[in-house]
Each structure stands twice: as C-alpha cells, then as structure tokens.
Image (cartoon, rainbow, N blue to C red):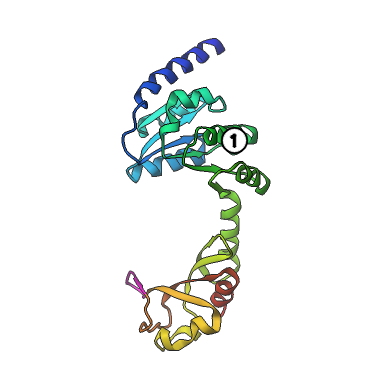
Amino acid sequence: MASYLHNLRRRRTKQLAAQYASPHGDQRVAVIGLGRFGSSLANELMRRGWDVLGVDSDPQLVQKISDDLTHAAVADCTDPEALRQLGVHEFTSAVVGIGTDVEASILIASNLLEAEVPNIWAKAISRQHGQILERLGVHHVVLPEHEMGERVAHLVTGRMMDFIEFDDDYALVKTVAPEVATGVPLGESGVRSRYGVTVVGIKRPGEGFTHATAETVIAKGDVIIVTGKTQAVESFAELG
C-alpha cells in the first residue's frame, strides 16, 4: 500500500509539473500544508481571484480541497525535487501553512528560499519557531494563535470593538468615541497632541464608515477608528 501511494504521488507530481512549466501571470501562490489554516487561506485566495496551487503530503486533505483550487497536488515538499517538479520556483508567492511539524516547516521554508521564491510566508506555532524562520530569511512570519490571543485579550479586557497591532509597536483600534473627542471639530479637539493618536475613520449609528478630517465633529455614540502607538491607543480607548 505504501509503495502504491508513493508511486501515485510520483506520477501525480510529474503530471502537474508539465502544467506549471510556464508562468501565466503574477497572481499565483503555492500553499503548502492544507490543514485548517492552509485550506482556509487557499480558499480565501481563490475567492480573491488568485491562482492557487495547494500541496500536502496527505492524499485525503488534497482530495478534500482539490475541487476548490486551481490545482492541487500530493507531494512531500521537504524534498526540493518535489518543489522543482511542481514549478514552485516560478511562483511569485508561497505560503508554508505547516505548523505542528516544525522540522518539516523549516525544511520546506529552506527549500523555497533556495528556489528563490520572491515572497515567502510561513506559519509559526511559537515565537522560537518564528525566530528560526526569520533567521532563515523567510520574508513574512505569521503566528496566528498568538496574534489572535493578544487580539481577543484586548477586546475582553477593554472598551475596544476591534484591535490590530502592527510591527514597531503600532496599532489600529475600533472603539466607541470617548467623550474627550466629541462635540468639537477634530482639528480643534487636541486629540493628536494630547493623546498621541489619530482618528482616521468614523461611523455614526445606522451609517457606514467615512474618512475623518480636521473638520469632522464626533458625536456621543459614534464608532471611530484610531491609529497610533499601541500604548497610546489603548489608553485613549479606555478614557470612556
């Protein structure tokens, strides 16, 4: 049985290699690892109009998602030859969606770097795992569980309706406008100079979001989008 699956994988890989031999546009991405994270990502990329090659060493995972993607293949991408046959070196982007098998994640990332894929993303299951990937040279490292944990913690413990933190200690927050920002035009409120944050969007009850300007007057109950240093936006959102 193992020999049969091995041969099946080899034949499938060779068949797909011919399909990917010539590039057909810049919006192509290879998603390696089709667990919950990888399959969800691959489906969203398809929805956004990208051509997606999904790859996994588990035939059942590949079969489950194959009808939803542009292409799908059973292959062991810790083997650089498998990546070469799939033509992944011709893709503009690749995502390593494997998290639980750290060794496989590192090997695949190394193979993608060796193949000079210009834009590589990789999922990490811990900060240590992420640091190893960064030292290898992976362009973008994602820690979904850790980042989601931080985000939910902010929502649970404060007045924020949403929280997104970026690099360099910078964040974007959705919150109900505190009283200190209401009643006068933003340019006169002193929000930026006093609290170190910038209001970039506003949503009034029953309306959609619009850009905020210096002339915008925020009313009680308005929802606002605020940006700035993480500690500054946290403190501002707690003013009430």
The reply, left or right, for residue 127 in relation to residue 61 is right
Quarter of the picture containing the C terminus is bottom right
Q: What residue do we see at 33% from left, 69% from top?
A: 208
**Residue 76, can we see it?**
no
Give above or below for 118 relative to 231: above
The reply, left or right, for residue 135 in relation to residue 28 is right
Q: Which residues are magenta?
A: 204-211
**Image quarter of residue 15:** top left
Q: Viewer-proximal residue, 136 or 222?
A: 136
**Residue 106's spot in the image, x, y percent?**
61, 36
Q: What residue do we see at 44% from left, 20% from top?
A: 13
**Residue 213's spot in the image, x, y percent?**
37, 79
**Residue 142's spot in the image, x, y percent?**
55, 48
Residue tagged 1: 105
Quarter of the picture containing the N terminus is top right
Q: Viewer-proximal residue, 70 or 28?
A: 28
Give above or below for 48 relative to 188: above
Q: Viewer-proximal residue, 156 or 81?
A: 81
**Residue 116, can we see it?**
yes
**Image quarter of residue 225:** bottom left
**Residue 158's spot in the image, x, y percent?**
58, 70
Q: Identify residue type, mark 1.
A: Ser
